[in-house]
Image (spheres, rainbow, N blue to C red):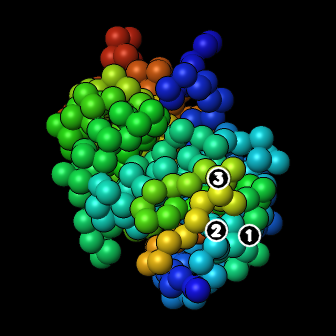
Amino acid sequence: MSVNVSINGTSHSLSEDSTLADAASLFGVTPGESGIAAAVNGRVVPRRNWTSTPLGNGAIVEVVRATAGG
Amino acid sequence: MSDEFLIGERRLASRLILGSGGFRSLDRFSAALAASGSDVVTVALRRVETTEGGLYEAIGAAGCQTLPNTAGCYTARDAVLTAQLGREALETDWVKLEVIGDDRTLLPDAVELLAAAEQLVADGFVVLPYTNDDPILARRLESVGCAAVMPLGSPIGSGLGIRNPHAIALVREAVSVPVVLDAGIGTASDAALAMELGCDAVLAATAIAKADDETMMARAIAEAVSAGRKARLAGRIPKRLYADPSTTDVGTPELSST
């Protein structure tokens, strides 16, 4: 079984036991990295909880990084 | 002479806040940051695949505090979530709150801004809102608990300076929290004027990042901020319509023979 999730605006099919950490790893990002954050369905998930946060079917994931800006 | 500058409970050594956007390279940003003497630097949050790492580390290596912004948000809801992402990413409860109304002017949407400010204060944030040069709105932002107000001098990135100095002076009178002139700085004299009008600090981004020599402009604006602050504290003379001789008439010799 798999779930369809949106990760940073792109649709992905992942195995149903996938977590937020798996989604972030698509970009080479790990929870230990500084300057990054993620939200699932409009709620911020602390980095320490990424590996224990499942992604249900239809989940909308955003993974962001601090970057240059005024 | 002690001239402390506090935002929230944090004492800041510099009255110039640097925006990190628009620099040609990370190295040139770091050089300008060192020249600016700033101890607070704004950053944005964007999807990881569109960004490169290193900025957060460079700001930390310089011993500076990051001030995450909510640039690009049009609604209070988006701004609140972006602020929460910034808190998680940068481990700070400070936020430069931006809620804009359209992408042509980038002017603040006052209604959404005030709603977002109220929610973020309730959520424990130290909120520094980018706002219009409107003393009434500034007072409303202070009343919901913002730690400072950041009125615009002119639109973001325009370099038009302070289009309405009178309004900035009124904002200064309207609130007791720090006033940080944000947006519109084009060159050093704009920063000096902001400080002479009573602003507590200046935020400069494009004026430095896009200058031919970013490092020299960073130094120039930092010196202008310092000079403007001193002029404000010193108390300028009133403006007069007619001349007022600086040399006395008393004892002027009678030299005409007729």
N-terminal-most mark, 2 or 1: 2
Please, what is the three-letter code of the amino acid marked with disc 3? Asn
Horizontal arrangement in the rendering, residue B94 relative to residue B11 (left or right): left
Please, what is the three-letter code of the amino acid marked with disc 1? Val
Rendered position, B257 above or below A10? above
Q: Secondary structure at mark 3?
A: helix
- Label 3 Cα crowd, 10 Å radius (few <14 / some 14-19 / many 20+): few
Q: Chain of mark 3?
A: A
Q: Chain of mark 2?
A: A
Q: Depth check: give the residue in front, B152 or B234.
A: B152
Rendered position, B170 above or below A24? above
Q: Are marks 3 and 1 on the same chain?
A: yes
Q: Secondary structure at mark 2?
A: loop
Residue highlighted by disc 2: A19
Residue highlighted by disc 3: A49
Q: Where's residue B255, x and y in %?
A: 37, 25
Rendered position, B241 above or below A52? above
Query: Is residue B16 among the parts visible in the rendering?
Result: no
Q: Residue at x 41, y 21 (%)?
A: B235
Please, what is the three-letter code of the amino acid marked with disc 2? Thr
Q: Are marks 2 and 1 on the same chain?
A: yes
